[in-house]
Amino acid sequence: MQPIQSTSQLGTAIRQRRQEAGLTLVLAAAACGVSVKFLQALETGKPTVQFDKALGVARHFGIQLMIA
């Protein structure tokens, strides 16, 4: 397990899991209940994304954020 310490690391992890699942941005966004624009911003590490939505997408792809 690797700690996620930035929006960039979270975005990279989500993009990797999405690609491993063979999902396009369009399909993944629909599955997560977010817009394609939001998912693109999240995957590129945009620091101002809505955290609740970001957590939902992370959960969808089995990514957990933990408090150390």
Image (cartoon, rainbow, N blue to C red):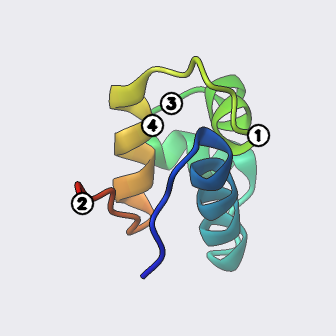
- Which mark sits nearer the N-terminus, 2 or 1? 1
**Residue receiving disc 2:** 68
- Which mark sits nearer the N-terminus, 1 or 3? 3
The image quadrant of residue 12 is bottom right
Mark 2 to mark 3 CA distance (whole Å): 28 Å
- Which mark sits nearer the N-terminus, 4 or 3? 3
Q: How packed is label 1: few (under 14 Cα within 10 Å), some, or many (20 or more)?
A: some
Q: In this rendering, which labeled residue sits more in front, label 2 or label 3?
A: 2
Mark 2 to mark 1 CA distance (whole Å): 25 Å
The image quadrant of residue 66 is bottom left
**Residue receiving disc 3:** 34
Query: Is the residue under label 3 in contact with that under label 4 (CB below 8 Å)?
Result: no
Q: In this rendering, which labeled residue sits more in front, label 1 or label 3?
A: 1
- Which mark sits nearer the N-terminus, 4 or 2? 4
Task: Determine the secondary structure under disc 3.
Answer: loop
Q: Is residue 45 left or right of residue 10?
A: right
**Residue receiving disc 1:** 44
What label does residue 54 carry, if any? 4
Q: The disc labelled 2 sits on which kind of residue?
A: Ala
Mark 4 to mark 2 CA distance (whole Å): 19 Å
Residue 38 at x, y percent in the picture: 62, 26
Q: Quadrant of the C terminus?
A: bottom left
- Which mark sits nearer the N-terminus, 2 or 3? 3
Q: How packed is label 3: few (under 14 Cα within 10 Å), some, or many (20 or more)?
A: some
Q: How packed is label 2: few (under 14 Cα within 10 Å), some, or many (20 or more)?
A: few
Query: Is the residue under label 3 in contact with that under label 2 (CB below 8 Å)?
Result: no
Residue 34 at x, y percent in the picture: 50, 30
Q: The disc labelled 4 sits on which kind of residue?
A: Ala
